[in-house]
Image (cartoon, rainbow, N blue to C red):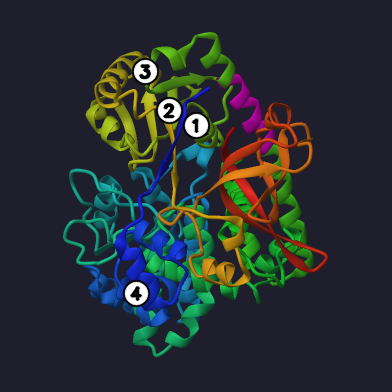
Amino acid sequence: MIETIWVLTPYREEAKTLSAELGIPSEIAQILVNRNLCDAESAGKFLFGTLEGLHDPYLMRDMKKAVERVRQAISRREKILIFGDYDVDGILSVVILSKALESLGAEVDYFIPERLKEGYGIKEEHIEIVLERKASLVISVDCGIKATQFTKRAKEAGVDIIITDHHLPGDILPEAKAILNPVLKDSGYPDRKLAGIGVAFKLIQALFEKEGMSSSLPHYMKLVSIGTIADVAELKGENRLFVKFGLKGLEKVANTGLLSLMKFCGLSGRRVSAGDIGFRIGPRINAAGRMGMTDLAVKLFFTDSLPESVELVNHLDKLNSKRQKTQQKNYEQALRKIRERSLDKRYKFLILGCEEWHRGVIGIVASKLKDFFHRPVLIFGYEDGKAYGSGRSINEFPLIGCLDECKDLFLNYGGHSMAVGCTIAQENLTPFKKAANAYAGSRITDEHLKRKIYIDSKIDFSDISSGFIENFYLLSPFGAGNPKPIFMTEKAEVVREPQKIKGKHAKLLVRQKGRIFEALGWDRGEWAQSIQKGDKIDLAYSFQFSKYMGEEKLSLSLEDIKT
């Protein structure tokens, strides 16, 4: 078992000041300080920010060029082809940009490559699709920043390219008419952490402002929030505003397909959380791309037919179930390989592959293994002499840096610190493993491999009042960059025998300072055997909200316990 260390963030004086200035509980102020929001102005924007806080889209390099070229295409009735990616971010970027351009009178078509046949990104040969569809302007969404050969061929064919992307560039930028990408060093944009759909939205914002249509922008934010959450973008700055107001908008939905999907997930007409998107909505949209049927998801958001939308949602749910089964099978196979070969004892970076592993799910398998072994993991699926990889990492080890060191071995690769994708000839796997393990071995310490729970604040059960919870809600939405706060309560008494539920979870009833809460240990069924009624334990937990008989119920989602 991986050693777990509790790290209690020390209380800082700024929290006391912030608590007084904003009139919020000291524990809430402490959480804001932990997120480096130490003054009343920045903390106030975080808690109470409005859409007035969105940045001017023209701060982004090339935005003026992009807007002028799009408006020119619309006035000349040129066909615009939107080229997207097959994940939720890419799919919904295609949807919102298509709908926005059509509302401006544009002639729009779209293309998304199939994950299992064509892989990620715009390739040189995709120029044939553009010419076949007679498009004179291509706009990429969530991809394209490395498409140098494609843009060269397009230029030769008289086709203009506008790239909207959020991934890191290669050594050379594509020769495009305009490049909208906040991560470029000279992008000029103050918020570098936008998801692909966020960049597409900034283009829409600029176009709509030009046409006096800014009042329509909140309508698009519903899908922007879903794409941002699904892409695990940091929920700070503009992303926070997108998600906060997008989730609010999801309480009242007009799009037929989205409405059917939300009803199927039991989310219509109620408060929707980032977790609901991440665990219910996102996976069903993503399943289409993962299982090689991306177009089903796109069609869902374009249909006006209720029966067709219901049929598409059912199909997506079946694909998601198939994805889950395939993922679980591949995960168990990978886990067995690691244990049989003691790979976790021998290596700080786990790299393994198999010809049977499905390329559409290896990223999720890598993520689960990363969480289980608390170290970077790169999983490969083999096909036709090539190894297609997907990797996930821990905070202490920027994975893209490792791949950069081995770049001469790859056919292609991309990603960021925490997640990467790559393709490599199978014959190069052995030298890559050797180089990658040497690189990781010199940079990952034994301390890095210990799982850490960062506790935001100590709290007694008696302090968890309705007023406290009201202030707690202001911190949401939670996700990357703004994780659910973790609290610690000491000496809580177990007031009844713990239960093991569904064969794998632990359910406790705990009392401290005169109040009792239900506490759930997900996938920690062993706690039901190791803890007894009457034991006093320390708890590390986050809050979990659910509805029962029309009333909201608060329980504790346990991160860890100490007896």
Residue type of the residue flagged with mark 3: Leu
| Quarter of the image where the C terminus is located | top right
Disc 1, SS: helix
Q: Are marks 2 and 1 in contact (CB under 8 Å)?
A: yes
Disc 4, SS: helix
Mark 4 and mark 1: Cα distance apart in space: 40 Å
Q: Position of residue 452 (x, y in %)?
A: 43, 36
* Residue at far bottom of view: 212
- Disc 4: CA contacts within 10 A as few (<14), some (14-19) or many (>=20): many
Residue type of the residue flagged with mark 4: Val
Q: Position of residue 82 (x, y in %)?
A: 43, 62
Residue appearing at x 25%, y 57% in the figure: 155
Nearest to N terminus: mark 4 or mark 2: 4
Residue type of the residue flagged with mark 1: Ala
Q: Are marks 4 and 1 in contact (CB under 8 Å)?
A: no
Q: Is residue 245 above or below residue 312?
A: below
Q: Give the residue number, with chain letter if any, for mark 1.
A: 366
Q: Camera-side residue: 447 or 63? A: 447
Q: Camera-side residue: 107 or 57? A: 57
Q: Give the residue number, with chain letter if any, for mark 4.
A: 70
Q: Give the residue number, with chain letter if any, for mark 3.
A: 429
Q: Which residues are magenta?
A: 324-334
Side of 194 relative to 320 (left or right): left
Residue appearing at x 35%, y 71% in the figure: 18
Asked if the magenta segment contains residue 464, the reply would be no
Which SS does the magenta portion mostly show?
helix
